[in-house]
Image (spheres, rainbow, N blue to C red):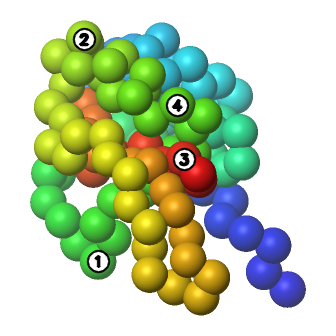
Amino acid sequence: MIKGIHHISMKCLPGDLPKVKDFYISLLGLRLIREWAEGIMIDTGNGLIEIFTNADGTHCLGAIRHFALLTDNVDDAVNKVKAAGYEVFVEPNDKVISSNPEYPIRMAFCFGPLGEQIEFFCER
């Protein structure tokens, strides 16, 4: 029945849209696939990010704490966002998630252009 997550939706002020596009498309290399009067849709490769500009932007945490972008190289992604002036609040690090079976990963976190928390994630 459920096949996966289709998209994550965020909202921003219309004036913030250029920096959102710059971050996700120019900096991270994601692909803009759809644009309409009130927003855009960006392809992450295995899901979409939808950004609406027809509402007040907010910078608060709700039930969803962050979203993770799968990458081949966490350190390269972090270096790009740092060079662009974005805050990295968890530096790249290796972890083994205690589970059955154990799950070795490399991860880091930054704040995006709307204050969203983004995890860069790589399976080891």
Q: Of callouts 2 and 1, which one flags the residue occurring earlier in the amino acid sequence?
A: 1
- Looking at the rendered structure, which numbered label has been put on residue 73? 4
Which residue is most to the right? Answer: 1
Q: Tell me whether circle 1 and circle 3 mark residues in contact (CB < 8 Å).
A: no
Q: CA distance from mark 4 to mark 1?
A: 28 Å
| CA separation in Å, label 2 and label 1 | 30 Å
Residue 79 percent coordinates (x, y): 32, 19
- Eye-nearest disc, 2 or 1: 2
What crowding class fits label 3: few (fewer than 14 Cα within 10 Å), some (14-19), or many (20 or more)?
Answer: some
Q: Position of residue 15 (x, y in %)?
A: 24, 22
Q: Dot 2 corresponds to which residue?
A: 83
- Tag 1, which secondary structure? loop
Secondary structure type for disc 2: helix
Which residue is drawn at the image coordinates 33% and 28% (left, top)? 78
Give the mark nearer the N terminus: 4 vs 2.
4
* Mark positioned earlier in the residue sequence (2 or 3): 2
The answer to whether 1 is drawn above or below residue 50 in the figure is below
Q: Position of residue 45 (x, y in %)?
A: 71, 39
Q: Badge 1, how many Cα within 10 Å: few under 14, some, many 20+? A: few
State whether residue 20 is above or below residue 58: above
Determine the image quadrant of residue 16.
top left
Residue at 49% across / 56% down in the picture?
A: 105
Q: Which mark is residue 63?
A: 1
Residue for badge 3: 122
